[in-house]
Amino acid sequence: MTVLTAPSWSWPLGPSELDGVLTKLRRWTPYDGEKVLDDVGAVLDDVLPPQDVLADLAVRLCGHLARLADIAVATEAGQEDPEAERLVRQARAVCAQQASVARVPTVGQLRRLAWAVNELQERLTVLGCLRETA
């Protein structure tokens, strides 16, 4: 009778890699569709927020776009839906453009960001990648 031996088990990640994973987990925040809609609404409203919060809004909107693009990639929405793929490319282009401009964005730049966020969020909701937010 032949005895089969399994190879010995080893840790898949070393201490430094595990530390990196832990750091990323600690920085992670769950997707909050309500916050996204609040920021989009603040920019697309008839009355813009005060000038001193425009830069913060631009940063948050770019963060929302990045997170939505990540969700689209993770769920393979872009591979299955040409419109989602177009919106992800548009989101990345709008954020890259925003990063290259002055610290305080113009109204037009903010509104482009907000529309990109809104369109991508709506498409991912239609595709079932996100739950609908009110």
Image (cartoon, grey):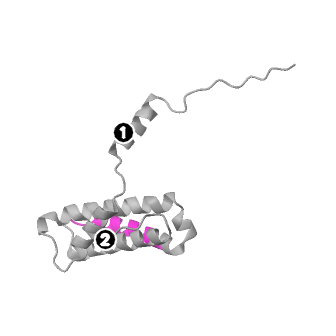
Three-letter code, disc 2: Leu
Q: Is residue 67 above or below residue 29?
A: below
Callout 2: SS: helix
Q: Position of residue 74 (x, y in %)?
A: 50, 57
Q: Residues within 10 Å of mark 1 (few under 14, many from 20)?
A: few
Q: Residues within 10 Å of mark 2 (few under 14, many from 20)?
A: many
Residue at 41% across, 72% down: 122
Quarter holding residue 96: bottom left
Along the line of sight, the residue nearer the viewer: 40 or 86: 40
Tell me, for residue 113, which label it has, or none: 2
Task: Find the distance from the CA under tag 1 to the CA under tag 2.
Answer: 29 Å
Q: Position of residue 85 (x, y in %)?
A: 50, 70
The residue at the far bottom in this view is 46
Q: Quadrant of the C terminus?
A: bottom left
Q: Position of residue 32 (x, y in %)?
A: 33, 59
Along the line of sight, the residue nearer the viewer: 108 or 48: 48
Whether 100 is among the magenta residues is: yes
| Extent of the magenta region | 86-102
Along the line of sight, the residue nearer the viewer: 76 or 96: 76
Q: Is residue 11 above or below residue 74?
A: above
Q: Which residue is mark 1?
A: 23
Whether 35 is among the magenta residues is: no
Three-letter code, disc 1: Thr
Q: In the displayed structure, does residue 56 sit left or right of residue 121?
A: left
